Amino acid sequence: MQLCIIAVCAFVLSAIFGKLVIPALRALKAGQSIREVGPSWHEGKSGTPTMGGIMFILAAVLCTVAGGWHAMRGGYYTHLIVLAFAVVYGLIGFLDDYCKVKRKQNEGLTALQKLVLQLAAAAAYLALLRYTGSLTCDLYIPFFQVTFQINWIVYMIFAMFVLVGCVNAVNLTDGLDGLATGVTMPVMAFFAITAWLWKQTTLAIFPAALFGALGGFLLYNFHPAKVFMGDTGSLFLGGAVCGLAFALDMPLVLILVGLVYLLETLSVILQVTYFKLTHGKRIFKMTPIHHHFELCGWSEEKIFIVFVGITVVMCVLAYVGVSPRAM
C-alpha cells in the first residue's frame, strides 16, 4: 500500500511540475535540435522543449526521500545510494543538454568527456555498494538459481562497462515520443515488486516513485510530445535501471527487462559493422531500430505500444526467473 501511495504522489507531482517546467523551458528557448540523420519528418519536432526530465527527476527525488524518511532514521540508505547514482548521471546529461542548447546544435559534451564522467560515477557507485555490503562478487544466473563467484577486480571492470553500456542503451531508446518513458515504466514496476517481495521494502521505494513520476511525465511526452526528456532524463533513467539491478545484486536480469534497450544498441552496432565490412550496404533502413520501423510505415504510437508490450512480457518472464531466489 505504501508503494502505491508513493507512486500516486509522484505521478501527481510530475504532472504538476509539467505545468511549471514546460513554460519555463520555452521561455529559456531550451528547444531540441533534431539530428540531421534522423527521418526527415522529425524536423517538425525541432524547437520542442528539451531537458523535461527535470520534471520526473524532481518528483522521484521528493517522493523517494519522503517515502523513505522512516527507513533513513532507522539507518537504511541503500535506496538513497541508488537515487544519488541516477541523479549523478542525470547531471551528466544536464551538462550535455545545456551545451546543446547553448550552442543551438545537437552536439554537447564530447564522447570522451561523457565516457570518463560515466566510468568515474560507475566506479564510485560500485565501490559504495560493495562497502555497504549490498553488492557481492557472485554473478547470479536467473532461472538456474546458481551463482558464480568472480574476482572483485574482474567483477568491478565487468560491472563498470555494463553500467555505462546500459545507461547509453537507454539513451538510444529515447528517439521517439514517449518511447523511453513507456519502456522504462514496466522495468521500474518489476524492480519495485521484486524488491518488495524480497523483503527489501526500502529499496522498492525509488522504483515505485519513478514509476509514478514517469506516468506523470508521459502525459506531456506521449505523441505528439510537448516536451522531451533530453539526456538529462534518459541518462537518469539509465542510471536508475542499471543501478537497481546491481543494488539487488542481479545484473544479468538486465538482459531480460532491458531487452528493448539491448536491441536498440545491437541494431546500431550491427549496422555500423556491416556498413564498414560491405563498403556501404545496410541491414536496417535506419538505426536505432525504432527508426527502421518508422521507415517501414509504423506510426510512433504503434512502435510505442509494441516496444512497451515486449518489455512488459520480458519483465514478467524476468520475475518468473528470479522469484525462487526469495524463497
Image (spheres, grey):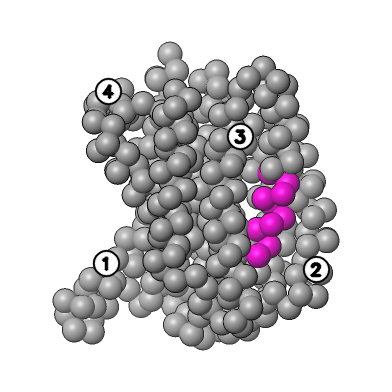
The spot of residue 270 in percent (x, y) is 26, 67
Comparing labels 3 and 2, the label whose residue is closer to the camera: 3
Q: Quick check: marks 1 and 3 in contact, CB under 8 Å?
A: no
Please give the residue where the numbered disc 4 appears in the rendered image: 146
Along the horizontal axis of the image, is 134 left or right of 140? right
Asked if residue 59 is among those painted magenta in the image, a careful observer would answer yes
Type of the residue with mark 3 = Leu
Q: What secondary structure is marked by label 3?
A: helix
Please say if 134 is above or below 94: above
The spot of residue 163 in percent (x, y) is 40, 47
Please give the residue where the numbered disc 1 appears in the rendered image: 270
The answer for how far apart the CA atoms under marks 4 and 2 are is 51 Å
Type of the residue with mark 1 = Leu
Q: Quick check: marks 2 and 1 in contact, CB under 8 Å?
A: no
Bounds of the magenta segment: 51-60
> Label 1 crowding class (10 Å Cα cut-off): few <14, some 14-19, many 20+?
some
Task: Give whichever of 258, 137 is nearer the camera.
Answer: 137
Report the magenta stretch's main SS.
helix
Q: What secondary structure is marked by label 1?
A: helix
Q: What secondary structure is marked by label 2?
A: helix
Type of the residue with mark 2 = Ala
Q: Quick check: marks 3 and 2 in contact, CB under 8 Å?
A: no
Does the image show residue 293? no
Task: Give whichever of 97, 15 is nearer the camera.
Answer: 97
Along the horizontal axis of the image, is 218 left or right of 252? right
Instruction: Specify the quadrant of the image occupied by residue 219.
Output: bottom right
* Quadrant into which the C terminus falls: top left
Determine the residue positioned at 35% across, 77% down. 285
Labelled disc at residue 24: 2
Type of the residue with mark 4 = Val
Please give the residue where the numbered disc 3 appears in the rendered image: 80
